[in-house]
Structures are given as C-alpha cells and as structure tokens.
Image: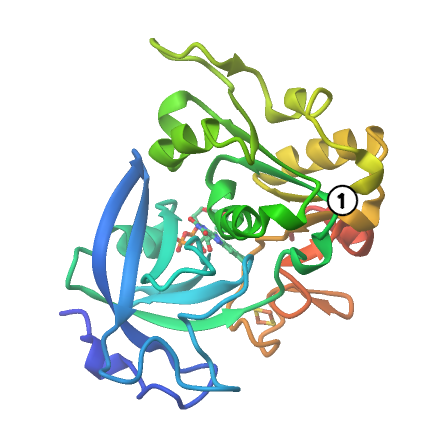
C-alpha cells in the first residue's frame, strides 16, 4: 500500500497543538554516518514560520525546546531544535537514525515534506545566566539540543563571566558540526574542550570520556550554570563531576529525552509522579529531577 501523502494526513495548520504543520526540506547535511541536519521551511503558504501570538509556531523557539516531527505515513517523534534562536534562517533539526521514524526523517530529501508540531517544553535558563559562567557539556548527539544554547550564549557573551563547551564523542568521525567546532576552537569568547572515546588516524586531541575535561575547565563552580545533554550514563557521571567541583544541584540542568507521544500532557507517556517531561521538561534542573533521573525508564 502506498504511503499517504502529506495532504491526506495533515490537518490544516493552526487547528491546535495536535495538528502537524507541513514543512518542506530545504537542505540535508550529513553530520556522521547515521546523523543528518535538516533545514525546513513552511510548505503550507501560511505566514511563515509562525501563526501569531499564542499559537503554535514551530519556527520561533527558545533554546532547548523540541518539536514533534512527523514522517508522513511512518510516525512522529520528538526532536530538539538545533538551529540559531536569534537567526532568521530556516528551522533546523539534527536527527540520528536509530529506528523507523528517525530513519525516515533522515532520508527526507530536499523538496520532501515533514509534519511539525511545536515548539514544546522548557528551555535552557540563559536569561538568568548574566554575570555567571555558562558550562555546556555535550555527549554525542547531545550537542544538537545544546547548539541553540551555545549560539545564544555567544550572542550574549558580553553579559557572561565565561563560556565553556566540553564535547565528547565515540570517535572523531562521530562528532557533530565539525566545521563549526573548528571555528569555535579559534573563538576567544569560548573555552572549548573536545575528547573522543577512541582516536582515529589524524586525531591529536584528547582521548577519554568527557567527564575527564571537567576538573581543569576554566569556570567558578560557585558562580556557574551548567547545561548537559548526552546518553543518560554520561549525564549521571557529568552531574556527579560538577557537584564534586562544588556546583549547586539547582544550577545544573539536564534535558530528559525520554520517549514522548503527545507532547501536550495528554497521553501520560512521559509522566513521572505529578511531573510531565513534555511540560516541565525536557530541560530541568538536577535539583528538581534527581529522584526520577536516578530511576531507569520502564
Ligand atoms: C525531548 C526530546 C528531544 C529529542 N531530541 C532529539 C534530537 O535532537 N535528535 C535525535 O536524533 N533524537 C532526539 N530525541 C530522540 C528521538 O525522539 C528518538 O530517537 C526517536 O523517538 C526514536 O524513534 P524511532 O521510531 O526512530 O526509533 P524507535 O524504534 O522508537 O527506537 C529505536 C531505538 O532507540 C531507542 N530510543 C528511542 N527513543 C529514545 C530516546 N528518547 N532516548 C534514547 N533512546 C531512545 C529505543 O529504545 C530503541 O532501542 C529526542 C527525544 C526527546 C524525548
Ligand atoms: S508526551 Fe504525552 S503526556 Fe507527555
């Protein structure tokens, strides 16, 4: 049976938070063997990229927010926005193909359509970081949801006491945004550390897990705010290393990227106690999330 087309499966835009809006793929850039960054623009002829105040607007977002991305006829998954929050450019998502839906999104060629709902969720508390050190720790694909925070921090760098980016990857070829990483390495506004679990020919950088960079990173733990995304085991060790350096749990923020279905507190898929990860998260302070974070997903 042929997959339904976008017009067959897409309710018209603006009906509410459950109605995906069709977006067209403008470009598709391969980051690693299984990860692509897609640039998207509205395909419905409506005023792009949004609908107006109070309405869902997938093109305007705060760093850390996510959209529900629908591969028509396959399924819908939550994906963080990875683009520049201050930019005029298209909506960007960086997606790792791990299963049917994410693989279908990664396969979408320029001109193809995807459905977009959002943006949803909380954001990195950049606004409250003035006068403080911002410490961003990314593991693998975790750099994607952190890229808007980094770009926002760079744009407001004069307001900050310092800016540190620590990135870990399985190998050099698994690192995202490699051209940008090179540019950030030369950028005096930023202290960058990059490490890989295993080196490849030509790699002369650090080797080891990302937590090994935390001890020597140039920030004052008593006056810092940290943003972390990566595999849960990496986030656990990173939180421990930051707390060992003396950071307050309320200043350590993580993105809980556990599975979601509706993104609007209706299905309960992301619920833990009175908390919904799609509403209170995905970005939450470690102080708020600790009991849940130390429990494996069921
Ligand atoms: C708030 C939020 C933001 C996200 N942002 C991004 C992003 O920017 N880029 C990106 O590539 N992915 C992101 N994800 C993860 C993405 O939603 C999942 O990879 C996707 O749902 C997998 O769906 P699938 O049908 O392709 O694979 P499935 O068949 O559902 O899963 C394939 C495999 O991946 C595992 N898996 C599925 N979802 C997750 C998850 N959330 N965390 C860890 N393992 C998972 C499954 O256990 C299974 O082993 C985000 C998730 C959340 C909740
Ligand atoms: S994803 Fe449905 S309640 Fe949060």
Image spot of residue 81 (x, y percent):
45, 58
* Neighbours of disc 1 within 10 Å: few (<14), some (14-19), many (20+): few
- Whether residue 72 is visible, yes or no, is no
Considering depth in this image, is 257 or 36 the residue closer to the camera? 36
What residue do we see at 49% from left, 52% from top? 148
* Residue 200 location (% of width, % of height): 37, 12
Residue in the picture at 45% in, 27% down: 186
Q: Looking at the image, in which quadrant does ligand 2 appear?
A: bottom right
Residue 282 sits in which quadrant? Answer: bottom right
Foreground: 185 or 254? 185
As helix, strand or loop, the secondary structure at mark 1 comes to loop
Query: Is 229 on the left-hand or right-hand side of 247?
Result: left
Q: In this view, does 112 lie above or below 143?
A: below
The scheme the figure's colours follow is rainbow
**Residue 4 sits in quarter:** bottom left
- Which residue of the protein is positioned furthest toward the front in this rendering? 158
Residue 176 shown left or right of residue 190 in the figure: left
Look at the picture and state if 222 lies above or below 79: above
Q: Residue drawn 39% across and 45% down? A: 98
In the depicted view, which residue is nearer to us: 189 or 86?
189
Residue 163 in percent (x, y) is at: 63, 38
Residue 247 position, x and y percent, is 82, 38
Q: In this view, does 108 lie above or below 192?
A: below
Quadrant of the image occupied by residue 89? bottom left
Q: Identify the residue shown where x is 40% and y is 22%.
A: 172
Q: Mark 1 points at which residue?
A: 294
Q: Could you tell me how many numbered marks the image carries? A: 1
Q: For residue 19, say whether it is visible.
A: yes
Quarter containing the N terminus: bottom left
């Amino acid at each position: 049976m042929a997959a339904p087309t976008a017009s067959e499966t897409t309710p018209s835009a603006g009906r509410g938070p459950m109605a995906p809006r069709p977006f067209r793929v403008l470009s598709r850039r391969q980051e690693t063997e299984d990860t692509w960054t897609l640039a998207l623009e509205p395909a419905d002829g409506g005023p792009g990229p949004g609908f107006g105040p109070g309405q869902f607007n997938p093109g305007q977002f705060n760093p850390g927010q996510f959209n529900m991305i629908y591969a028509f006829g396959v399924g819908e998954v939550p994906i963080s926005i990875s683009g520049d929050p201050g930019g005029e450019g298209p909506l960007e998502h960086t997606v790792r193909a791990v299963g049917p839906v994410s693989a279908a999104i990664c396969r979408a060629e320029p001109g193809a359509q995807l459905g977009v709902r959002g943006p949803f969720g909380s954001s990195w508390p950049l606004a409250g970081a003035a006068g403080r050190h911002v410490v961003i720790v990314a593991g693998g694909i975790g750099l994607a949801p952190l890229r808007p925070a980094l770009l926002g921090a760079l744009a407001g760098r004069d307001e900050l006491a310092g800016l540190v980016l620590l990135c870990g990857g399985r190998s050099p070829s698994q690192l995202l945004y490699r051209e940008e990483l090179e540019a950030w390495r030369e950028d005096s506004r930023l202290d960058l550390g990059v490490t890989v679990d295993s080196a490849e020919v030509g790699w002369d950088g650090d080797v080891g897990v990302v937590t090994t960079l935390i001890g020597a990173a140039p920030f004052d733990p008593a006056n810092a705010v940290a943003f972390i995304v990566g595999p849960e085991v990496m986030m656990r060790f990173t939180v421990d290393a930051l707390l060992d350096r003396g950071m307050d749990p309320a200043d350590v923020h993580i993105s809980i990227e556990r599975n979601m279905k509706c993104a609007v507190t209706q299905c309960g898929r992301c619920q833990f106690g009175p908390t919904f990860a799609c509403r209170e998260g995905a970005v939450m302070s470690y102080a708020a999330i600790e009991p849940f974070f130390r429990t494996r997903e069921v």
